[in-house]
Amino acid sequence: MNRKVLLLSASFERAKGTGAELAAAATRGALLDDPRAPSGAEQRAARWKVRSAYGDIGLRYSEDETVAYVASRMPAIYSACHRVLREVRRRLPSFAPAKVLDFGAGPSSALWAMRSVWPKSIERVNLVEPSKEMQRAGQNLLDNLKGLPLIHSYDSIQELNRNIEKHDRGHDLVISSYALGEIPSLSDRITIVRQLWDLTRDVLILLEPGTPQGAKIISQMRSYILWMEKRKCRKIEKSTCTTPGKITSIVSQETSLKNGAFVVAPCPHDGRCPLENTDKYCHFVQRLERTSSQRAYKRSKGVPLRGFEDEKFCYVALRRGKRPEEAWPLDGMKFETLKERHAKRNPEDLIIDYDTQFPREEDEEAPVNVEDNLVPYESDAQELSLFHESEEEELEEQFVRADLGGGWGRIIYSPIRRGKQIQLDVCRATKRDASEGAFERIVITQSKNPTLHHQARRSLWGDLWPF
């Protein structure tokens, strides 16, 4: 098993190198349609012209590679999918998908995560996986389980469209996890994403490894979908200009509900990525526990591995429709400085009762277990909540739901704590309609704003930040 895992890792490295070379050849000019560009209309239209059928649909796994994949990679991919789906559920608390499409399903890692996040709502799942060995592995893992939704497997999107009626092709949730990076051709990748978006009725999630290549794929596909929907809305608006006023208003309302797209997570805006053409890239980290067998399978040169693993990933979740216009969370709020807060304290609050601070010997209790006296870190409580659904629901009820307006930024790197000041790298919207965004470094000090400083101390990489 150790040999199989090492061979699989080597094949991933070769595929990663090929994909990086192809990504380097694709410039931004070949991916974005700029109406102000000096080129002609025909040349602009040809930029998004792609083949209707794609050739290489991904890696075909052998039996040994499939076994090694399930043993070594499936837990990490499951944890990344679970993290992304939980974030979508937090941003869309009323969203409960009934019909789901999983492209590049593999051994059904995303299906396990979806059943954990939405255990009662999912009724039907369509899996698209070209590898027969992966399909068999997924079926074996799901055997003898109770309460499963109706599951169908297909080799390609074309086969799915042939076997499903046109009126029944819409899916509430479409997810592609760690699949687009296995398709080397950029034009084929764009074709697949466009087909996945056509099969999406509500939410589309694209998930890739947290590498520069994976982040570039996510950024390209995000730009393509937003550009495509904006162009579609412009065409519909032009066609409705010749109609009477009342009819025009009705059509425009239906257009805003059915057409258009906006980013649910992680981006707080729908504009150009501010990290594009920089040495930084947007990604996140999910820590997971390794079992003893995983540490044995994945060890290299006989060196034992750590008991945990940090899975880096990048993703985007898009939803059909128009982004709701919400008030920004800090509008109209006034914060006291530390000096002003101290000035409001009563003199009685500063008196120390030494009798209560130092108990007498006869009041001391018998010694207890030292482990019971340990104060858990707040991050420990957050990690433990992942394994206890009841505790997780109680924790989520304590927090205020963040709306989908442009007033919530995203912390995209680990906060830097230096003394009594905290530095946050935040991607935020610069306009009220969230049409443009920027990357900013925010410095929060305890003296100027103790309230936000307290929140910044509790914030982690990937959290939302109010503006």
Image (cartoon, helix red, strand yellow):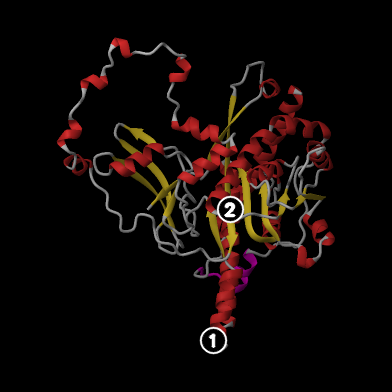
Q: Quadrant of residue 242?
A: bottom right
Q: Quadrant of residue 50?
A: bottom right
Which of 221 and 37 lies nearest the eye of the viewer?
A: 221
Residue 287 horizontal/vertical position (percent): 56, 32
- At 54% from the left and 37% from the top, the residue drawn is 391
Q: Residues within 10 Å of mark 2 (few under 14, many from 20)?
A: many
Q: Residues within 10 Å of mark 1 (few under 14, many from 20)?
A: few
Instruction: Name the residue furthest bottom.
Output: 244
Residue 246: image tag: 1
What secondary structure is marked by label 2? strand
Depth check, mark 2 against mark 1: the one in front is 1
Residue 317: image tag: 2
Residue 7 within the segment the image draws in magenta: no
Q: Is residue 292 above or below residue 116?
A: above
Quadrant assignment for the N terminus: top right
Q: Is residue 80 left or right of residue 452?
A: right
Please report the bounds of the magenta region as a residue range.
37-47
Instruction: Name the residue furthest front.
Output: 362
What secondary structure is marked by label 1? helix
Residue 73 visible in the picture: yes
Amino acid, disc 1: Lys
Amino acid, disc 2: Ala
Q: CA distance from mark 2 to mark 1?
A: 34 Å
Residue 411 visible in the picture: no
Instruction: Tell me which secondary structure the magenta stretch mostly adopts.
Output: helix
Q: Is residue 387 left or right of residue 66?
A: left
